[in-house]
Image (spheres, rainbow, N blue to C red):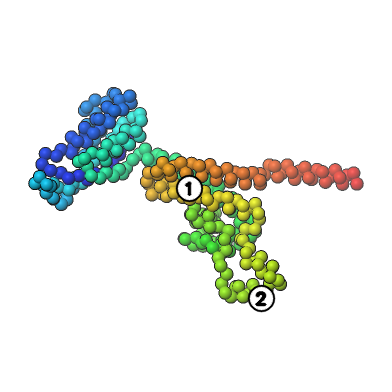
Amino acid sequence: MIFEFLIFYQEKIGTDICTTLFELLSQIIDDLEIYFDDFNSDEVKQMLIFRHKRLGDETVDQDGNTLCNTIFGFALELPEDTDEAQALVEKFSQALAETDLISHVVKFEDLLLCKNLIQWSKGIFLLEMKLRRVLTLIYLNAYQGDFYNLLREEIVKCTSQPTAEEMQNTRENHFFHLTFSQYVQLNNRPDPQLRDLLSNIRNSESYDSLYAELNRKPVQNQNDAALLLDIKDKMGAIEKMRNCVAHNRQPSRRTIDSYDLAYQEVNDLLNKYLDRWNWQEANESEEEASSLKQSEEGEN
């Protein structure tokens, strides 16, 4: 397993950054000896691979020593079967940041992070596909036609604006081109233009009918509208995790905890909604109703 680092420090005569890094790593391994007691000194040295060194501006400190701003790149390579590798990398990274000599630390390639991001990505994929399935079920019922214009009354619009032909070829619809932050804006019509407002006024038979039209939502079914409302406050946490996955960065502990909670809540809401349209139960109900009707006809 490879973990790439860049550090920034001020180098002066006598500075041996390689020895400093080796000593830091050795100390971390000693502190975690319950997991790493099999590593000897030579094996620890081989874990550090020194890659880059770039010298910058020079300065002089209060004692008259010449210091050179230095960027140093190295990799930490651990055996694939290393136990508690995550703990070692985290403690080593922290030790680097707390060392007086080193001013700045950035970690790049991290296969442990990669594995975690892949797992989160799979979960987000499944959840978003289920969400799109539910949204399609809702909006096809709301309009029952013009399949590639389901957002026609919505304030939210796709950023990529795919054509109907493109969506038909990929077997997708507009919900495949929304982000989690846009899902929360669904079921909201834009404010009417003046000419549309005047047209509504002219065509309305009463104030009540005008009021109803102006306040009409794209999705009017109460259960469908309630679901869209229920998921709104949970999309933010999923969006934050999706951004971490999309941009290959480590989510904070708070982001992870918020995502785990929101994921479970949204998944439960979607499952509960889909259960309302369970084919087997609907089919059994139809068969029961048909049987009852036939029985009544026979009696008559």
| Residue 20 in picture, x, y percent from top left | 19, 36
Is 189 or 176 nearer to us in this picture? 189
At numbered mark 1, what does the secondary structure look like: helix, strand or loop? helix
Q: Is residue 198 left or right of residue 49?
A: right
Is 132 or 104 nearer to us in this picture? 104
Residue 112 visible (yes or no): yes
Residue 162 visible (yes or no): no
Residue at image location 8% in from the left, 46% down from the top: 64
Where is mark 1, residue-wise? 238
Is 40 or 19 nearer to us in this picture? 19
Among all residues in the image, which is located at the extreme left?
A: 64
Q: Is residue 20 above or below residue 277?
A: above
Q: Is residue 165 above or below residue 294?
A: below
Residue at image location 58% in from the left, 46% down from the top: 270
Residue at image location 50% in from the left, 56% down from the top: 182
Q: Is residue 197 left or right of residue 281?
A: left
Count how many numbered circles sit on residues in the image. Answer: 2
| Residue 18 in picture, x, y percent from top left | 18, 37
- Mark 1 residue type: Ile
Residue at image location 84% in from the left, 45% down from the top: 294
At numbered mark 2, what does the secondary structure look like: helix, strand or loop? helix
Q: Which mark is residue 202?
A: 2
Among all residues in the image, which is located at the extreme front?
A: 62
Q: Which mark is residue 25?
A: none
Give the Cα distance between marks 2 and 1. 45 Å
Give the quarter of the image for residue 40: top left
